[in-house]
Image (tube, grey):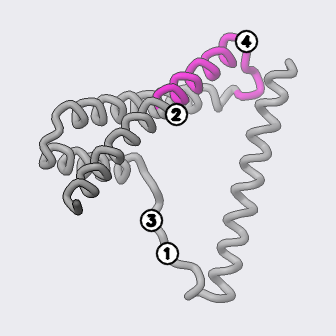
Amino acid sequence: MSDERATFHLELEYLDARERELKSRLESKAASDPEAVEPVETITMERVCALAEKMLAILRQAGTPALTTAWSTAFIDWRRAQEGLEMLITQLRPRAEELNADDVQSLDTARDRLDDAAEQFERVHAQVVAWFYDRAIGSEA
């Protein structure tokens, strides 16, 4: 196994162990003091998309076609990159012990694409927040 693959496997093992540890702590806390732990809904792509639709409706209503388009485009790019990485992981998981250099390169490329899409979305979202902030400050003056 190459060093890169070994590192990848160690990262996955660590993340799996950390997830189990956090779930165990939460379950233990909920068992000892149920009111201390608020139930939360699992974040799913469906919920994220529903929130995105609400945001787009707010932007449309605010009359900002350029920001609406930029936000929508950035969100769609992020979503496609996220789905692409998830699909690749699903394809590669059954043969995780046998990944070759091309597989690792595909994962790296998909991760880089997702990182770029997330950064672009964050930039556009910051512009939207700034626009709303300026609008709110302007209405207070």
Q: Quadrant location of residue 68?
A: top left
Q: In which quarter of the image is the C terminus?
A: bottom left
Is 43 placed left or right of 139 in the picture?
Answer: right
- Tell which circle, 2 or 4, labels the residue nearer the N-terminal end: 2
Q: Provide the residue designation for mark 1.
A: 39
Q: How far apart are marks 2 and 3 (CA)?
A: 21 Å
- N-terminal label among 2 and 3: 3
Q: Which amino acid does label 2 sit on?
A: Glu
Q: Residue at x 28, y 56 (%)?
A: 137
Q: The residue under label 3 is which amino acid type?
A: Glu
Residue at left offset 45%, top offset 38% = 122
Dot 1: element: loop
Q: Nearer the viewer, residue 26 or 73?
A: 73
* Distance from the alpha carbon under mark 3 to that under mark 1: 7 Å
Q: Mark 2 points at which residue?
A: 86
Q: In this view, does 101 lie above or below 112?
A: above
- Please state the horizontal and vertical placement of residue 54, each as a whole percent of the image: 24, 52
Left or right side of 12 for 114: left
Magenta region's main secondary structure? helix
Q: Residue at x 73, y 12 (%)?
A: 101
List x then y, in percent, for residue 110: 55, 23
Dot 4 lies on which element? helix
Q: Residue 101 carries which label?
A: 4
Q: Position of residue 100 (x, y in %)?
A: 73, 14
Q: Nearer the viewer, residue 33 or 96?
A: 33
Q: Distance between the residues labelled 3 and 4?
A: 38 Å
Amino acid, disc 1: Pro
Q: How crowded is mark 3: few (under 14 residues within 10 Å), some or many (20 or more)?
A: few
On the picture, is 88 further left or further right than 16? left
Q: Sort mark 2 into few (<14), some (14-19) or many (20+) by Cα contacts within 10 Å.
A: some
Instruction: Find the residue positioned furthest to the front.
Output: 141
